[in-house]
Image: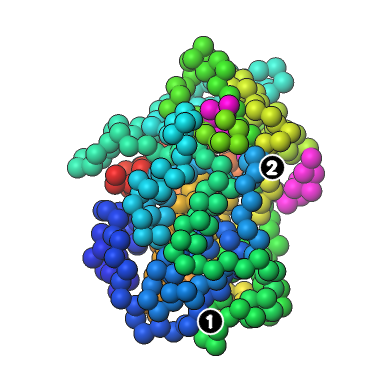
């Protein structure tokens, strides 16, 4: 089975555990495909491409179609890279984790690693100032479970486009071919071989192919605003230290806003020491008023930054904002038969909420690639491998939306209990991994 095969290499995909990077490329089963064509160079697509290109049957037969990754100061996409993700990237690319880390992080800039996470319930108004009502340290890298070494970082703060650029570079080194063309079916078929696998690593369907099961209209969205910060008065405020992250909730009339602040480094914004993001669940009826939603989130973002002693860096050039639909939590039927809809599989549920998007994409890319090489049902294997992440994601989604009223009371009276399952995810190796 696939699970036993991963276990024999030190990995147990279904249990989401890691016991060391295996660099050998397993012998492929009888190949079902003579080539793989991947639409768009997204996170999951690049990871899958890098792993597939290392196999004997698909060497020099993996192509990514779409525009090249462009690095930008604007914070588009997630910036919280769980250390666990580095191990899956290393496994996909056939490298050591240390090499991935050294190529990603600039030694000339301050470290961007998080070793402790603090959580707090806030009160007040963004315009007049916020204060901490209740706080707790709910995740500490020095307190690993028995039998495991503590002290390794929980996560790193890096710009999404910088990480994507590194993944593209590693995939090219593995022999992946990149073609800057459109992502329509005609573009993909012009490149594909006689027995090609089409992989959709973009969120929308492939133009020109029949859509058998159109996605339902989203009922909720996750709205988010993020910017990098300079730690001007971090020590004076004394809320967090330079290697700690801060998670907070601010109640308002329609639910809970959630803020996340992490140590951060970016060569394109070298003065930045932290990045911050504030997001909330928005019903479809309110999503149309995007400007008002983003204005409210932006005010909260700057107010929490002020509470921590942080000053935004070049907001006009660096601010990112997004309104992303919440997709079904269960495994949705394939909308385009014959296509491996990798982006859809890796992104089920709420985006952004738990900061695990990069990890989900890395796991999904590795599992999909190795499942394809073994002739298995890749969609089923990816869905099973990400079940634990989807559960935690959905629980936090409910705290921000449907259960926001009891969540306020719980965060005030018993924050450790409220966040118990989220904090346990560290001990299940969903953050730091085994290094």
Q: Is residue 56 left or right of residue 134?
A: left
Count of labels in the image: 2
Task: Find out whether residue 288 is within the magenta segment.
Answer: yes
- Depth check: give the residue in front, 84 or 323: 84
Judging by the rendered image, the residue that carries numbered circle 1 is 196
Q: Quadrant of the N terminus?
A: bottom left
- Residue at 67% from the left image edge and 36% from the top image edge: 318
Q: Is residue 92 visible?
A: yes
Give the residue furthest to the top.
Answer: 236
Q: Where 130 falls versus 331 (above or below)?
A: above
**At which x and y percent is residue 325?**
66, 54
Give the residue furthest to the bottom.
Answer: 194
| Pointers 1 and 2 in contact (C-beta within 8 Å) | no
Q: Which residues are magenta?
A: 271-291
Quadrant of res 333: bottom right
- Residue at 49% from the left image edge and 76% from the top image edge: 61
The disc at residue 321 is 2
Q: Which badge, 1 or 2, comes first in the chain's sequence?
A: 1
Could you tell me how far apart the alpha carbons at marks 1 and 2 are, in whole angstroms? Answer: 37 Å
Q: Is residue 167 left or right of residue 144?
A: right
- Other residues around mark 2 within 10 Å, as few (<14) / some (14–19) / many (≥20): many
- Residue at 65% from the left image edge and 44% from the top image edge: 72
Quadrant of res 154: top left
Q: Is residue 295 left or right of residue 222?
A: right
Q: Where 247 falls versus 309 (above or below)?
A: below
The disc at residue 15 is none
Indicate the secondary structure of the residue bearing disc 1. strand
- Other residues around mark 1 within 10 Å, as few (<14) / some (14–19) / many (≥20): some
**At which x and y percent is residue 426?**
36, 42
Q: Is residue 380 visible?
A: no
């Amino acid at each position: 089975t696939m699970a036993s095969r991963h276990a024999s290499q030190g990995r147990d995909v279904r249990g989401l555990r890691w016991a060391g990077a295996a660099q050998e490329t397993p012998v492929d089963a009888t190949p079902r495909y003579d080539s793989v064509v991947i639409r768009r160079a997204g996170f999951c697509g690049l990871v899958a491409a890098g792993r597939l290109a290392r196999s004997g049957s698909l060497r020099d037969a993996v192509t990514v179609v779409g525009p090249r990754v462009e690095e930008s100061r604007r914070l588009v996409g997630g910036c919280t890279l769980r250390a666990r993700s580095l191990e899956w990237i290393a496994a996909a690319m056939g490298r050591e984790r240390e090499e991935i880390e050294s190529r990603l992080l600039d030694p000339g800039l301050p470290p961007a690693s998080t070793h402790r996470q603090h959580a707090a319930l806030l009160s007040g108004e963004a315009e007049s100032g916020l204060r901490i009502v209740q706080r707790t340290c709910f995740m500490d890298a020095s307190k690993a479970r028995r039998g495991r070494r503590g002290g390794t970082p929980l996560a790193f703060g890096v710009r999404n486009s910088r990480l994507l650029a590194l993944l593209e570079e590693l995939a090219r080194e593995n022999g992946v071919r990149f073609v800057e063309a459109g992502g329509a079916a005609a573009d993909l078929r012009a490149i594909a071989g006689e027995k090609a696998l089409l992989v959709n690593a973009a969120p929308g369907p492939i133009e020109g192919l029949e859509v058998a099961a159109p996605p339902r209209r989203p009922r909720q969205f996750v709205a988010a605003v993020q910017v990098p910060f300079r730690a001007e008065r971090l020590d004076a405020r004394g809320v967090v230290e330079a290697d700690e992250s801060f998670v907070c909730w601010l109640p308002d009339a329609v639910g809970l806003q959630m803020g996340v602040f992490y140590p951060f480094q970016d060569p394109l914004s070298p003065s930045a020491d932290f990045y911050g993001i504030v997001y909330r669940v928005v019903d479809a009826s309110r999503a149309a008023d995007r400007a008002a939603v983003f204005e409210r989130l932006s005010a909260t973002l700057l107010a929490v930054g002020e509470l921590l002693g942080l000053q935004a860096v070049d907001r006009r050039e660096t601010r990112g904002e997004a309104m992303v639909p919440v997709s079904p939590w269960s495994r949705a039927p394939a909308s385009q038969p014959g296509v491996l809809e990798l982006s859809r599989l890796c992104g089920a549920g709420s985006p952004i909420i738990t900061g695990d998007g990069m990890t989900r994409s890395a796991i999904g890319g590795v599992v999909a690639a190795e499942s394809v090489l073994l002739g298995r049902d890749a969609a089923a294997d990816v869905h099973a491998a990400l079940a634990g992440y989807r559960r935690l994601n959905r629980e936090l989604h409910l705290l921000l939306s449907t259960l926001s009223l009891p969540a306020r009371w719980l965060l005030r009276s018993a924050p450790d209990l409220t966040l118990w399952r989220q904090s346990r995810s560290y001990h299940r190796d969903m953050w730091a991994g085994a290094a």
